[in-house]
Image (tube, rainbow, N blue to C red):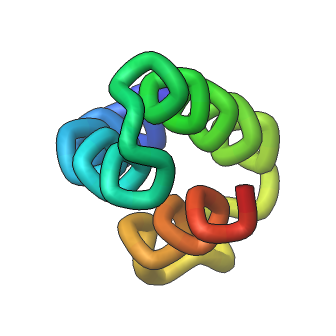
Amino acid sequence: MDDQQHAVEQHITALRRYAYVLVGDTTEADDMVQECLTRALSKVRVWRQIRNVRAFLFTIMHNL
């Protein structure tokens, strides 16, 4: 789990910027990031198949 957590943590700042661009409100953007991270971490069992964690996270964010 530590490897997955570290892989996610390094993209949080970029996710926050992207979420802010999408919604234009920092509170709403933080909520979107929280939901994105919740969804990503709930799928840890399929992480071996994911080659690009950044793309995976941004896809989740975009779909939110």
- Left or right, 6 with reference to 46: left
8, 1: nearer the viewer:
8
Residue at x 45% of width, y 34% of height: 29
In the image, is 10 to the left or to the right of 43?
A: left
Between 26 and 37, the one lying in front of the other is 26
Locate the C terminus and report the quarter of the image it occupies.
Answer: bottom right
Q: Residue at x 44, y 66 (%)?
A: 53
- Judge whether 59 appears above or below 12 on screen: below
Q: Residue furthest front?
A: 24
**Quarter location, residue 36:** top right
From what the image shows, is residue 26 above or below residue 23?
A: above
The number of numbered badges drawn on the structure is: 0
**Residue depicted at 72% across the width and 67% down the height:** 63
Residue at the extreme top: 27
What residue is shown at x 22% (from left), y 52% (from top)? 14
Question: Relative to 10, is 52 above or below?
Answer: below
Please say if 45 is above or below 27.
below
